[in-house]
Amino acid sequence: MVWDAAITALGVLSDPTRLMFVVLGTFLGLIIGVIPGIGGLVGLALLLPFTFSMDPYTALAFLVGVQSVTTTSDTIPAVLFGVPGTVGSAATILDGHPMARRGEASRAYGAAFTASVCGGLFGAFVLALSIPILRPFILAVGTPELLSICLLGLTLVVSLSRGAMAKGMVAAAVGLLLSTVGDEPQTGQLRWSFDLAYLWDGLPLVPLALGLFAVPEIIDLGASRGSIAGDKVKDERWQQLQGVRDVFKNWWLVIRCSSIGTLLGAIPGVGASVIDWVAYGYAARSVKDASKTFGKGDVRGVIASESSNNAKEGGALVPTVAFGVPGSASMALLLGAFLIHGIAPGPNMLDEHLDVTFTLIWTVAIANILGAGACFLFAGQFARVATVRAGILVPLVFGIMLVGAFQGARDYGDLVVLVLSGALGWIMKTRGWPRPPLVLAFVLGGLVENYLFISHLRYGLEWMLRPVPMIMIAIIAFMLVRPLVSYVRGGRRPDTKILHSEEVSAQPLNPTEIMMWAGTAALFVYVLVSSAEWEPAARLMPRALAVVGLIAIAGYFVWCWFSGGFAAKSKERVPWAGAMGQGLWLVGLVFAVGVIGMLPAMGLFVMAYMRFEGKSRWSNIMLIVTPYWLAAFFLFHELLHLPWPQSLLGDWFPALRANLGGLV
């Protein structure tokens, strides 16, 4: 019966029309993954209405094709610019971008795309075999188990900041606090909204993540006036093949990380933002000599992240198909597509609708092969972007980044958040503070608070005594205490620089460092004071985080006192002037958006930057700007129908706004 259904589904999918829609969905998914801030969730939401007139097989194949490959192409901006195309590629930055700066972007792409297709095929294979097997395990997962998994994922990232563990803990606490801004769902308490309607729903993830990761990299690139890889680019073809060889050489790592991605993807509520970090953290602790090379351009870090985030798609389909419980936000939209087309997920999907289930499985496999093949085909061209000088590349990336950031809450405030978080990200990067714990904590904050509230309400403190949470808490405690024990027993400082080689380090307590620590301590004190009169449910997590943050700060200063950190002086020179100049360009672009509209501001900004910063000729500028602006107009305005922020020019001349279709 199973094999008959599989063969029947393959025959249905091999229909030329359906196969064409799979290819089209794969192509659109690749484009969506490349554009920072759009992501698979937004892509599915935009494309879902176009499937209403399709038959169920074609519609689901099209949507699954879109979703399956966004985590393949999101590697491209992650490697080149240190910009996560989606949250699922954030861990790829840690080793992929250093490889690009070393001139090995093609090798990173070869490894990433091969690991992606292996992970995707593994997820599809497990999906085909495991739905009946995993059912009792999935049904046994409750909020205490989900809470402990989220805390483990967060601890993995914090523990990777060896030598900067206190900084990682404080950054994670700040990220969790930022996630509490806005309306508290249990009590309706507005927390730190400062009477701004924009903050009632909380800070949006997309502009915050782009600001923390992308803006600092692009600012430094612009200040350097060079290119990403300088003159260190090596032969692209050979590098791609070397990346493929790296994957097959580390085949056991691929299987282990793909298993992690598939298993965690099958657990509803975990999400893509955790899975690649868990896999990366596992690899950083299990791979030989990882402490010396991870975060500095180790291809095994790219393999671990990419194999897990593609495998999760097959895993996330398990609860969606078998039980009607979406494994992620994207799967929730896919579940909506099921219902729209008259298919009710549940046990029937393993019986009378088994052919539909195998259609999804075949689509995941085909889309991953097509997506990886397309990325391989153009990987050399993408890698050459690393040689383009900053005067041309920076304004183009800034423009696309602005479009992605605006998809957060589709409010002008998104652009303000981008600038402010970009400044914070640059300071954290230059002063040795780890950024990944902050952004991951922000992503998990809502889930952690919700799971904590439900677990405490239902079980009290006994939720920690359930088998899975108890094991997870023991692992978390071991991971946090082990570096301190090693330091005390060995009489030496713990290893450093596991995340970004330039980003995480146990820096001495110079005046700038002291100001940053004092600022975070003041923030935690403010949280304790300002939340004193809130309802218990609203103040539970913020006050707990503030206490943990203050304890981490006190512990760090005690450690510095005994290790002599107070007396040390830093010789590092921070390029404040160049960074300020690039930051003013970004601020000017955001200001221009508010005056004349986003697309017009993008065109003028690119021309001005290339002329005055890049010293380019007007003829060359127009050859670049014209197709760039037309492509942005066609893709974002005509094809995706993205909304644009209203400008003063449009307010002054409403007829102009109406005639231009809302561009100003």
Image (cartoon, rainbow, N blue to C red):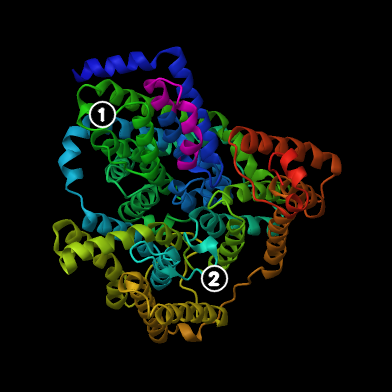
**In front: 370, or 453?**
453
Q: Assign a secondary structure to mark 1.
A: helix
Looking at the picture, how far across and down is residue 481, in whole percent? 27, 71
Image coordinates for residue 452, horizontal then vertical, percent: 27, 63
Task: Give the number of the mark in front: 1 or 2.
Answer: 1
In front here: 571 or 118? 118
Kindly identify which numbered label has been placed on residue 128: 1
Quadrant in which the N terminus is drawn: top left
Which residue is found at the position 38% from the left and 46% from the top?
304
Asked whether the viewer can see residue 502, the reply is no
In the image shown, does 300 or 126 lie closer to the viewer? Answer: 126
Q: Are marks 1 and 2 in contact (CB under 8 Å)?
A: no
Give residue 245's quadrant in the image: top left
Q: Quadrant of residue 662?
A: top right
Q: Dot 2, how many residues are within 10 Å of its Cα: few (below 14), some (14-19), or many (20+)?
A: many
Callout 2 secondary element: loop
Image quadrant of residue 34?
top right
Magenta: main secondary structure: helix
C-alpha separation, residue under disc 1 versus residue under disc 2: 48 Å
The residue at 55%/48% (across/down) is 407
Q: Looking at the picture, how far across and down is residue 230, in whole percent?
A: 66, 49
* Residue assigned mark 2: 431
Stretch of the chain drawn in magenta: 41-62
Residue 171 x %, y %:
44, 68
In the rendered structure, does residue 55 fall within the stretch colored magenta?
yes
Residue 417 as seen in the image, left or right of residue 632: left
Q: Amino acid at mark 2?
A: Arg
Q: Is residue 195 above or below residue 157?
A: below
Q: Residue at x 60, y 57 (%)?
A: 215
Tell me the crowding category of disc 1: few under 14, some 14 to 19, or many 20 or more residues within 10 angstroms, Cα based: some
Please tell me which of labels 1 and 2 falls first in the chain: 1
Residue 446 shown left or right of residue 655 in the figure: left
